[in-house]
Amino acid sequence: MKADQLLEKSKQYMWLPFTQMSDYEQDPLIIESGEGVTVTDIYGNTYLDGYSSLWLNVHGHRKKEIDEAIQNQLQLIAHSTLLGAANVPSILLAEKLVKLVPEGLTRVFYSDSGATSVEIAVKMAYQYWQNKGHHQKTKFVTLSNGYHGDTVGTMSVGSIDLYHKVYTSLLFDALVIPFPAIYRHSSGDEQVVRDESLRELRSLFEEQHEEIAGMVLEPMIQGAGGMNTMPAGYLKGVESLCREFNVMLIVDEVATGFGRTGKMFAVEHEGIQPDLMTVAKGLTGGYLPVAATLATDEIYQAFYGTYEEMKTFFHGHSYTGNQLGCAAALANLEIFENESLIQQAADKGDLLTELLQDIKQLEHVGDVRQCGLMCGIEIVKNRSTKEPFPFEERVAYQCTLKMRELGLLTRPLGDVIVFMPPLAATTEQLAEMVAILEQAIREVTE
Ligand SMILES: *Cc1c(COP(=O)(O)O)cnc(C)c1O
């Protein structure tokens, strides 16, 4: 089929996620193939994948080992259900995950997207307390600007007005604690911001802990909320408050997991021990939709008993534990070992800090936030007052269109340009991508 025909059909039949379709009509993009850290469109234009195909890709596209693992699995079976039955790669992957995550997490519950993995964690935490007879512990605490997915349950524990406000009356109420964001805080001091937020959390727990089931957060850096980094010690502080007040700590590693922040999981930066942890995006190396919710033995045991005791966790999706996906995930995790990818990711994160120095100095860059290979560049109209450009000008979006012209793909979050290259990007590729970022920001904003 001719490229122009595909283009017309895409405009005629498709409705794309998180996309104003009039934008798509104006600046369409149709990817046909990928190789390494690049993707190519139907017209033969090649782009560097500066957002890892939306924060998923790890080793680049068409990674031989993962391709082969899927092909091999296809020789056996593509899918059979996990309801009441297991399958081979899902077992092996569960074992591997339990060995990788913080020690206390010993059980793996599969699903198929980041949102479902968090939805499951929220339902598990809720039912845990019900099964234990603490019927009043039903509320959830979240951080402002948190993002945990688009289902009604995960929007309820999310806190991004742009996405969630219109659904307010549909959602359950969560208790929102201000995220310890440094850039726009009057003190500009990490410790002040950290302690202020922890104080608020303490007083909330003091007042309401008997009604609080759990607290949900993204560790070290918030993704969709604008790439907001946490001050050192904050996560550890939250953990000890959760312990003190008997609140379940649910850590959403959907974006941060699998080396993205320079550690296998972001919780390792502060050595914390979640009660529930969710993983998705990088789990299959960016290949297939597999997600998992990891739980402690304490939680697992609260659901264990005879059927008549009515403690069963009644949740599951048609494609839960899909064999092709689990086989891809296994191959993905083997590459982490074989290529010492975590060390590489940490080193590349440090390199990126250096590369981003010039961008930090640009006239309309207010803040550059980074944790490993997860970065956000906040565009402002005025650096000293931190005044943003008018909403209608969509300056960050314009910057990303310019980047596309220059051969780099990414998407903005409001005024923040996201930069999240595949972990496999080489030093040279990282430098090339940052150079395009800089040129595009300059051309659009100056
Ligand atoms: C992307 C994301 C989700 C949602 O994952 P989906 O696979 O898009 O449903 C949840 N939590 C965090 C932190 C994310 O970044």
Image (cartoon, rainbow, N blue to C red):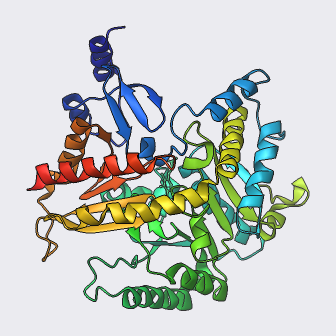
Could you tell me which residue is drawn at 55 percent across and 91 percent down? 206
The reply, left or right, for residue 359 in relation to residue 16 is left
Q: Is residue 372 visible?
A: no
Q: Is residue 315 above or below residue 387?
A: above
Left or right of 348? Residue 68 is right
Residue 386 occupies quadrant: bottom left
Classify residue 303 as left or right of residue 343: right
Picture coordinates of residue 319, whole percent (x, y):
67, 35
Q: Nearer the viewer, residue 125 or 258?
A: 258
Residue lying at the far right of the rendered structure? 306
Q: Quadrant of residue 209?
A: bottom right
Question: Where residue 365 appears, x then y in whole percent?
Answer: 20, 64
The spot of residue 66 in percent (x, y) is 64, 34
Residue lying at 76% horizontally and 46% vertically, measured from the top left: 93
Foreground residue, 10 or 421? 421
**Taking 205 as reference, is 342 above or below it?**
above
Say if 182 sits above or below 2 in the image: below
For residue 245, say whether it is visible.
yes
| Position of the C terminus by quadrant | bottom left
Percent from the top left, x then y, of residue 276?
Answer: 67, 65
At horizontal 37% and vertical 8% (from top left) the residue drawn is: 1
Q: Residue furthest front?
A: 428
- Across the whole image, how many numbered discs are drawn on residues? 0
Name the side, left or right, on which 277 lies relative to 34: right
Considering every residue shown, the one lying at the far top of the view is: 1
Say which of 427 and 34 sits in front: 427
Identified at 26% across, 29% down, the residue is 28
In this view, 283 is above or below 373: above
Could you say which is closer to the camera, residue 280 or residue 320?
280
